Image: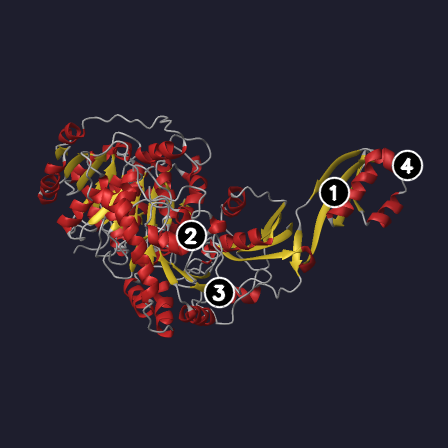
Amino acid sequence: MDTLTAKSPEDKTTDKKAEKISGSQAILDILIREGVDTIFGYPGGAIMPVYDALYNYHKYFNHILVRHEQCAAHAAQGYARVSGKTGVVFSTSGPGATNLVTGLADAMIDSTPMVCFTGQVFAHLLGTDAFQETDVINVTSPVTKWNYQITNAEEIPEVLAKAFFIAKSGRPGPVLIDVTKNAQTQLFDFKGYEPCEHIRSYRPKPLIRKKFVEDAAAMINEAKKPLVIFGQGIILGKAEKEFREFIEKGGLPAAWTILGLSALPSDHPLNVGMLGMHGNYAPNVLTNDCDVLIAVGMRFDDRVTGRLDKYAKQARVIHLDIDPSEIDKNVKADVPVWGDCKDTLPMLTKLIHKKEHAAWLKKFRELQKQEFEKCINVELNPTTEVLTMGEVVKVINELTDGKSVIVSDVGQHQMVACRYAKFNQSMSNVTSGGLGTMGFGLPAAIGAKLGAPNRTVIAILGDGGFQMTLQELGTIMQNKIDLKILILNNHFLGMVRQWQDLFMEKRYSFTDIESPDFVALASAYNIDSKRVESREFLKAAVQEMLKHKGPYLLEVKVGKENNVFPMVPQGCSVSEIRLS
Amino acid sequence: MKKDFTITVYTEDRVGMVSRISNIFSRRKINIEYLNTAPSEVEGIHRFTIVINESLEVVRKLLRIIEKQVDVLKAYSNTDEEIIWQEVALYKVSSETITEKVKVERLLNEYGARAVAIRKDYIVFETTGHSEESKKLIKFFEPYGLIEFVRGARVAIIKNSHGFHEKVKEFEKKQPTENFETTEVEDDKAVFSL
């Protein structure tokens, strides 16, 4: 390897000059030190010095030129979600920076570690409405875990060290660093880089209270009908193994939020399915029947809880979370187990008794059977002529054996993908959960493929969401990203149409959406593609997509007015879940 | 039940803190009644004093979200009974009417006011106390023509606080001592570490 600091030719002219490097170079040096090898970005005026420095550093980084900054952020999210690493984004000031906002908000609510760099106008121009100036620090403050504006290159080492520490530690989240152009070009005495391990005002993990762990264990040991509900905290804490040991020892049925999906293998006997509005019947109904509800690394989102004043009122609640502000936010915890679940779960496992709860588990199986007959079978083995979304996902399951990464967009297809896709490996489901960002899927899948290059990555998209970010086909083309794009086309903005159907007397107000010829569109980007409209060709087409080397787009025409069931209608309790 | 809570926040001295903290309130459509921010007794640390009228439950949640901000060291909340608090108020009145019709001396005694500037055309009085008192004085001045009035934000000393000097040392440590914890809000579950 060359010296860490790649020197530009003029730096070599005199020794004295060689000691100093530019702010831009320092940024890139530090990225190398932080183990960053992939950057998603888009150049522009105010970030040009960084891109100029990148010209000399090209062998250290795989820079992916996206087609819109929002997609750089989503790609970084996809990258982070499958790799566990921090996603890195470069973008320019003004519109470049404001285009990141949706991605930042998404990463904030879904706790995704990300460090975004935005260029900014020269420090002396701040506040003058200079060309491409926006107050990005104030604009992004509600959607970042931390942000900071660098106006002097001397600040770079310390601020970047903090940025990476904050993004990744505790409950992860996005960090934005705004760097004025003068700081990027300024030569300064770079005295080396120390990664950050401690910030006095920031405590990433709360101290674990032993008493709460003991109280929780006692409660679990007394429980006759315990139910575990888990979220992304397990994945973020890399506590999949600890979690399995916990539920297996206690014989605890466990249900997941869509961000917790894939933390526990789909076929695990204690996996009782998905929570929430379009989740499975058994865990929703039995939430209002259990005697102890054990929430692990999840935040009781309203899509999970339904009507709060009728949510698990009979149960005592144990809440394990790393973020103290989540405790009692929506659901009052009887026992708050503060801390990283990687640490607290083994403590709990040690204290709980080995149990089986066979009769209680049988209740889940019975309700599962009801759901299978009324919903699942209809979706997976339809007798109708039109294809269903579920049967497409079923074909993927059969052909990939639960090994691929599934990235979904937002809407009906997302719910179907999360409900039916099978996983036997963690960090395999990438979706926009909290923010519900349409257009997330395609760019996030690009990032996911780069974050897990050896795995098959399938982007399952709707015709609506795909059209929000389809310009990223250009990114896929240019970078030859081996991504499988599956569009489930129902010619509608399906989820909104479903609500209009069920709750607004079928008044289909602007949900009827026309699309271009997706196959022709793909070929314009030199991406192989196919359209399937009937069942007999489905499996072969999916097979062809999966076997194809390089990017591939498969459009599947599905039933126009199919609804996703079960469903907890808004304003209803989880136990009022409808099967049809 | 809503009542006044005085929230005290210790933060790093950093650009943009006011907006980051005020965002937490405005996002939830909570009005800030008073906001005072100034350097604390510890160098590099600012102290915010924020007064809101809210329920205990909401205040609890707010405190946790405030503490979650990376540059916030600590947040406390107290009811009026738990603090000693003061507000400064300045009153500008016309010299002519006030010296003609009122015995300034009486005014000073009765309302604890003090004249801080005496000019030919106006006098500026100052009081330090609670808002009820300043309201009374405003009422008193009204007939004589109150030209201008300004009230300062509340500042408050927490009765049972032992100060922040010692705490900062704990913050500096990577692993704080086990007993280093505070209960911020009454009957809370002895919440978190710092």
Q: Which dot marks residue A312? A: none
Q: Earlier in the sequence, mark 3 or mark 1?
A: 1
Query: Which of these two is toward me, B25 or A536?
Result: A536
Tell me the residue that label 2 is attached to.
Answer: A300
Query: Which of these two is toward me, A562 or A443?
Result: A562
Foreground: disc 4 or disc 2: 2
Q: Which dot marks residue B90? A: 1
Residue A227 appears in the picture as rendered? yes
Q: Residues within 10 Å of mark 4 (few under 14, many from 20)?
A: few
Foreground: disc 4 or disc 3: 3
The residues bearing labels 3 and 2 have C-alpha atoms spaced at a distance of 23 Å
Q: Give the image location of residue A544, x and y in percent.
A: 9, 41
The residues bearing labels 4 and 2 have C-alpha atoms spaced at a distance of 66 Å
Query: How is this picture coloured?
Result: secondary structure
Q: Amino acid at mark 4?
A: Lys
Q: Residues within 10 Å of mark 3 (few under 14, many from 20)?
A: many
Q: Give the image location of residue A319, x and y in percent.
A: 43, 61
Q: Residues within 10 Å of mark 2 (few under 14, many from 20)?
A: many
Query: Which of these two is toward me, A465 or A193?
Result: A465
What chain does badge 1 belong to? B
What chain does badge 4 belong to? B
Q: Amino acid at mark 3?
A: Ser
What chain does badge 3 belong to? B
Task: Say whether residue A422 is left or right of residue A211.
Answer: left
| Residue visible at 46% across and 47% down in the picture | A307
